[in-house]
Image (spheres, coloured by chain):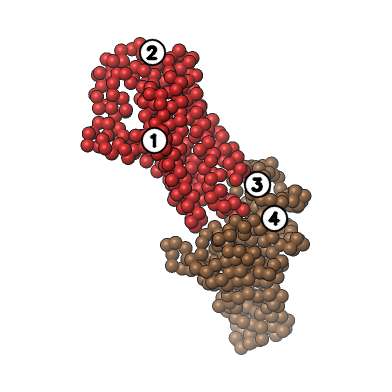
Chain colours: A red, B brown
């Protein structure tokens, strides 16, 4: 199994470097902009916007935009960051089974003395490690750049964000892992995972502005991930982590069960 | 001892009603080279994929080394070297990276034997697989199938893509595998190949095993097609010679299918006004049409 893990990491190495560089660049852009934004009359700016508009993107007061935690959450960590990593996660899980079926390398791989369970796990583990690395790298980037620009940010908040974001991304990985055993093309896995994540985000956003939909927010993964609260509140909600971990485990187990029964 | 044993092995693919494989009962004995002959779509690759547990049977079962191929799949695959019909290897790897990657699944790789195979096939392992020609991919896949001296070799049309010289090298390598007691099960639609290598052949047609024959008996059949070029009209009664199975009038002469020794036939037709004779091995389809209905 270790040869699969090493090979998959090698295959994804370049992609991860590009993703990390992109995340670093965007984080740098936002953090370098923040001192200038702080000097501008943000209160006036946010007051001029419709209340629903701010709520849709997860912000509800001037406080959110005037602090680095709120600014980063609204502009980046709340959605854009998740979307970028979802593309990676969908692509990584997609290439694990569906991609190998599509490329037809799976026949030769599975003619080797390895169980389908170990083959699937060997293919999933690199994606889990590398997606966690992207979150860790980005959290570290935020901390370093805040230090560099003399912006106060809570270390405990970054830690709380980091832990929750990793499990959040892993939950999405679990969903993508489930799809990879069902579909026979990598693109289908990527698109379905991204559309589902967008759907979750839309549900949370709409439930923020439509009272009738408020109760449905619980069905969205984004209910379990609020970077602004995590960065400001500095505490990890362990119930949320447990639910996210359960989604990952259910996704992986169901994927392996389906894969074991699959005709290739 | 039977290395492969199938009982009523049947496969109907999802969404179809045709039986890709219909109640296959087969026994392959330890140490033999067994050829599985049939035209395209006969069920050869389906059989091999079922034996490897890549697909599951609709009915029946198969055993390799005495173990059920589905229930003890891992144990079974520990003793198998497989060559797929179409080669799809990780394109981003170099040849040597690919060998190292697949070595990671297997125990007891014989490095000396591996190097000798690479040398015999004159394979450049430093190149990326995506830069390999079809023939070189085939050679690399053969090396991967053989490198750990498996007890059972499952080879799906192993010489497709190989040039004649490498085909000969492959034939000698397969015959040498008998030294370490390997059993070989290989599918082909090339009759000559089966005759060169096999101890026995199984003839499969439209998913059904038509016959299993000892290769010596098969060779003795000596099935040939002859084309007699003539502008004359020869009465059909002149072709009523023992050994002639079929006669057809063509635009340039006569097309004949014969079985057995041809000496008597040639002697008798030499009395006719014939300008040229072409003798060849008939196509597999032709053989099946006349002898394995």
Q: Earlier in the sequence, mark 4 or mark 3?
A: 3
The secondary element bearing badge 2 is classed as helix
The residue lying toward the viewer, choosing from A241 and B141, is A241
Q: Residue B146 bears which disc, if any?
A: 4
The secondary element bearing badge 4 is classed as helix
Q: Chain of mark 3?
A: B
Q: Chain of mark 2?
A: A
Relative placement, left or right, of B46 versus B159 is left
Nearer the observer, disc 2 or disc 1? 1
Nearer the observer, disc 4 or disc 3? 3
The residue lying toward the viewer, choosing from B243 and A130, is A130
Q: Residue A239 bears which disc, if any?
A: 1
Q: Mark 2 and mark 3, same subunit?
A: no
Q: Residue A36 bears which disc, if any?
A: 2
Mark 3 — residue?
B104
Q: Are marks 2 and 1 in contact (CB under 8 Å)?
A: no
Q: CA distance from mark 4 to mark 2?
A: 67 Å
Residue B53: x percent and y percent?
55, 59
Mark 3 Cα within 10 Å, few/some/many (few <14, many 20+)? some
Q: CA distance from mark 4 to mark 3?
A: 15 Å
Q: Residue at x 55, y 61 (%)?
A: B70
Q: Mark 4 and mark 1, same subunit?
A: no
The secondary element bearing badge 1 is classed as helix
In the displayed image of the protein, which residue is found farthest to the top? A39
């Amino acid at each position: 199994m270790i040869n699969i893990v090493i090979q998959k990491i090698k295959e994804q190495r370049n992609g991860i470097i590009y993703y990390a560089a992109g995340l670093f660049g965007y984080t740098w852009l936002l953090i370098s902009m923040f001192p200038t934004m702080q000097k501008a009359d943000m209160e006036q700016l946010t007051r001029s916007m419709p209340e629903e508009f701010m709520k849709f993107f997860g912000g509800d007061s001037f406080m959110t935009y005037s602090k680095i935690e709120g600014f980063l959450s609204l502009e980046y960590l709340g959605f854009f960051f998740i979307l970028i990593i979802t593309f990676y996660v969908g692509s990584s899980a997609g290439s694990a089974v569906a991609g190998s079926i599509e490329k037809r390398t799976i026949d030769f791989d599975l003619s080797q003395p390895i169980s389908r369970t170990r083959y699937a796990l060997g293919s999933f583990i690199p994606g889990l490690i590398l997606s966690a690395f992207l979150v860790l790298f980005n959290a570290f980037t935020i901390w370093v750049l805040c230090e560099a620009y003399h912006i106060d940010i809570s270390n405990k908040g970054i830690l709380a964000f980091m832990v929750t974001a990793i499990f959040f991304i892993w939950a999405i990985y679990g969903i993508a892992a489930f799809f990879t055993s069902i579909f026979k093309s990598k693109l289908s896995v990527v698109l379905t995972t991204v559309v589902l994540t967008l759907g979750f985000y839309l549900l949370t956003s709409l439930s923020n502005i439509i009272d009738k939909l408020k109760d449905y927010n619980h069905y969205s993964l984004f209910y379990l991930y609020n970077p602004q609260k995590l960065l400001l509140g500095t505490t990890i909600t362990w119930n949320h982590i447990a639910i996210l971990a359960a989604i990952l485990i259910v996704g992986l187990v169901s994927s392996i069960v389906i894969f074991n029964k699959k005709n290739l | 001892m039977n290395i492969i044993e199938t009982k009523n092995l049947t496969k109907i693919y999802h969404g179809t009603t045709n039986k890709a494989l219909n109640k296959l009962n087969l026994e392959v004995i330890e140490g033999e080279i067994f050829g599985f002959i049939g035209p395209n779509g006969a069920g050869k690759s389906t059989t091999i994929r079922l034996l490897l547990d890549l697909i599951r049977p609709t009915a029946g079962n198969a055993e390799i080394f005495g173990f059920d191929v589905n229930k003890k799949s891992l144990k079974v695959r520990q003793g198998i070297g497989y060559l797929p019909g179409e080669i799809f290897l990780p394109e981003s790897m170099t040849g040597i990276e690919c060998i190292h990657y697949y070595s990671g699944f297997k125990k007891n790789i014989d490095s000396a034997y591996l190097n000798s195979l690479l040398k015999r096939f004159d394979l450049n392992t430093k190149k990326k697989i995506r830069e390999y020609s079809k023939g070189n991919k085939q050679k690399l896949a053969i090396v991967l199938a053989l490198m750990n001296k498996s007890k059972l070799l499952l080879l799906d049309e192993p010489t497709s893509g190989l040039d004649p010289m490498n085909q000969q090298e492959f034939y000698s390598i397969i015959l040498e595998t008998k030294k370490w007691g390997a059993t070989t099960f290989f599918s082909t639609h090339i009759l000559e190949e089966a005759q060169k290598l096999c101890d026995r052949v199984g003839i499969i047609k439209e998913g059904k095993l038509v016959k299993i024959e000892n290769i010596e008996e098969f060779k003795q059949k000596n099935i040939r097609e002859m084309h007699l070029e003539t502008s004359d009209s020869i009465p059909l009664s002149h072709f009523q010679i023992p050994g002639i199975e079929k006669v057809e009038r063509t635009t340039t002469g006569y097309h004949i299918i014969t079985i057995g020794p041809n000496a008597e036939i040639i002697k008798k037709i030499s009395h006719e006004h014939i300008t040229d004779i072409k003798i060849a091995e008939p196509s597999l389809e032709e053989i099946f049409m006349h002898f394995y209905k």
